[in-house]
Amino acid sequence: MKGSLKKQSELLKVIENDYCVGCGMCAAKDPNQIKMYLNEYGQYKPKVKNFSGISEIEKICPFTNDKVDEDVIAGELFRETENIKHTDETGFYIDTFVGYTLDEEERLAATSGGLISWLAQYLLKNDLIDYIVCVGPSSEEGKHFEYQIVNSIEALAKCKKSKYYPVEVSSVIPKIRELEGRFLFIGLPCFIKALRKFTRLDPSLNEKIHYTIGLICGHLKTAKYARYLAHHCGVSNESIVNVDFRHKVKGNAAINYAFKVDYMKNNTLKSEQILMKNVWGSSWGNNLFMLKACEYCDDVFSETADITIGDAWLKDYSLDYRGHSLVLNRSNSFKEILEAGISRNEIHLDKITIDEAIESQSAGLRQRRNGLNARLQMHENNQWAPKKRKFATQYNYSFIYKIVQFLRIELCKKSKETFLSQELNGKGLGYFKQKLWVYPFILWAINFPKRLKRKLMNIFKL
């Protein structure tokens, strides 16, 4: 029976091959059939009672091969929009900007330039929405963050900043369906895609989602990533009260941020922080604690969202520790809102070219397009993998290039396994580094000539 289900069920293939990103949309569709749980590695997985009769549920998953990809969804949503343009890298867009909120306190409390919070506040204050669906602090013991529904500026203030932490929506989507009102949904590319697939099947839900804000995404981490960083600060799991993955440090470049942890010691709340550059293996390219699904996603710019916002990793902006937001807009409604913000002297925006927007995420695009093509080529014939869109190949996939991809895949897998072993055996970070050091070292050695060349070119302005 199980063999026949494998042939029939796309969702089973996604789960068994570890391509599930843990968004929880499937469980939101049918909570009696599917429940989400946090596994031993700190990532959400669906537990399915019966894989028969779930064809409707499978149509919601962002990683099943049902041909409803980002191009199909975005085409339905944006193709007829006035003044719309398109690139393979970004999907549809009207305008691209770099900017920030002019409220200095709000800007400093945000991950980048504070424009996501500003947009959400604007929509609430001007009665354009009734509720915001976003990630905030969790009240559940042992869990730091969760999706929630807020309807006040005060509650929204607690939901600021990036959370490199797994979350899922199985409890909030049913609440959206129950509540009367207009909603803003904020999420990662895969979450927005899954929501769009959900609303294609559920017109009543579609009518309630009035706006979506998508995040530019590198990849998603497991829950153990927060523990790993806290250990670098000398803080145990049990004493953690709150974590800030993107603590801004005055005088530093925006990219040179810190991890900050609040914890209890002797009944006193204390704080420690560490610059991310001082965390072992912290380079995003090392894939520590990354979900496997993220290496098989080709959407960097949240192509199915009304507007996309992320970090403006551009030379002219990245030195300011206060941060700048990159904005890629696909909606004339959001265009009017941004123009209103400028006229009210609430936000500052610099118009940039689409090439500059693409350049700001060049590393992520290389890995999600060229690297992804290479990884798919490396699959054995009998290995199932989600089908991805076809993009122009920019690289010859040499043996060395495939070695880099292999090492990234291994680091992703072994970092989760090794940290679990470290916790079960009561060992420290030394154990973790001892087991894994060779992988980032080889990656560093392979990439050293390229980095040296770039540095010399910068020094001599070649």
Image (cartoon, grey):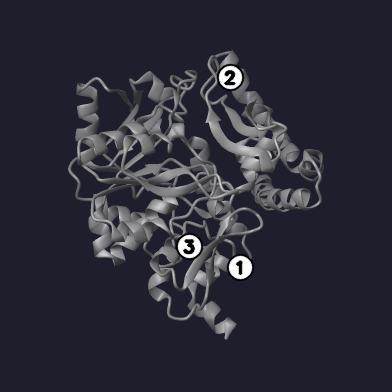
> Which tag, 2 or 1, sits closer to the chain's start?
1
At horizontal 25% and vertical 38% (from top left) the residue drawn is 123
| Left or right of 314 on screen, residue 279 | right
Which amino acid, mark 3?
Lys
Give the residue number, with chain letter if any, for mark 3.
Answer: 387
Q: Is residue 391 visible?
A: no
The quarter of the image holding the C terminus is top right
Label 3, residues with CA under 10 Å away: few <14, some 14-19, many ≥20: some
Residue sticking out furthest to the bottom: 1
Give the residue number, with chain letter if any, for mark 2.
Answer: 457
**Where is residue 40 shown, x and y percent of the image?**
66, 57
Q: Give the Cα separation between the discs numbered 2 and 1.
A: 43 Å
The quarter of the image holding the N terminus is bottom right
In terms of image quadrants, where is residue 367?
top right
> Which tag, 3 or 2, sits closer to the chain's start?
3
Give the residue number, with chain letter if any, for mark 1.
Answer: 383
Pick whichever, 201 or 412, lies toward us: 201
Which element type, helix, strand or loop, lies under badge 1? Answer: loop
User: Does the residue at mark 2 contact the one at mark 1 (Cβ under 8 Å)?
Assistant: no
